[in-house]
Image (tube, rainbow, N blue to C red):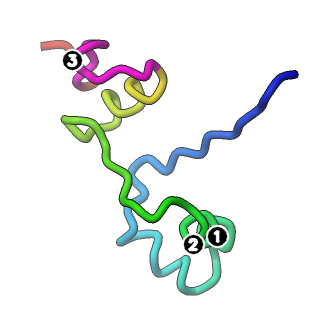
């Protein structure tokens, strides 16, 4: 038996931006996810930036293990 999942990433979608739309009823599914989801805050990786966060999500490793710290190599 196979299991399927849908991953929705709101990269850069801060609650400062989303909250007015949620309160206005424009994002009912996101409101339901927030209401019925886990009662603790989600914590990102260090540094909390797009490239290392998505790489950590995909690999299950932290930036120190996968080596992605940003979009450019220094």
Residue to which mark 1 is pinned: 32
Q: Between marks 1 and 2, how big is the CA–CA gap?
A: 5 Å
- Please provide percent x and percent y for residue 22: 55, 77
* Disc on res. 19: none
Q: Is residue 38 above or below residue 50?
A: below
Q: Between marks 3 and 2, how big is the CA–CA gap?
A: 33 Å
* Left or right position of 50 against 22: left
Q: Which quarter of the figure is the N terminus placed in?
A: top right
For mark 1, does the 10 Å Cα neighbourhood hold few (<14), some (14 to 19), or many (20 or more) residues? few
Residues under numbered marks 1 and 2 in contact, where contact means CB atoms less than 8 Å apart: yes
Label 1 sits on a secondary structure element that is helix
User: Where does the magenta region start and end?
Assistant: 59-69
For mark 3, does the 10 Å Cα neighbourhood hold few (<14), some (14 to 19), or many (20 or more) residues? few
68 or 35, nearer to the observer: 35
* Disc on res. 35: 2
Q: Residue at x 71, y 36 (%)?
A: 5
- Please provide percent x and percent y for residue 15: 39, 68
Residue to which mark 3 is pinned: 64
């Amino acid at each position: 038996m196979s299991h399927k999942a849908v991953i929705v990433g709101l990269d850069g979608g801060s609650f400062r931006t989303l909250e007015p739309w949620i309160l206005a009823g424009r994002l009912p599914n996101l409101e339901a996810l927030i209401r019925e989801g886990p009662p603790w805050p989600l914590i990102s990786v260090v540094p909390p930036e797009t490239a290392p966060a998505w790489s950590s999500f995909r690999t299950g490793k932290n930036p120190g293990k996968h080596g992605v710290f940003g979009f450019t190599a220094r």
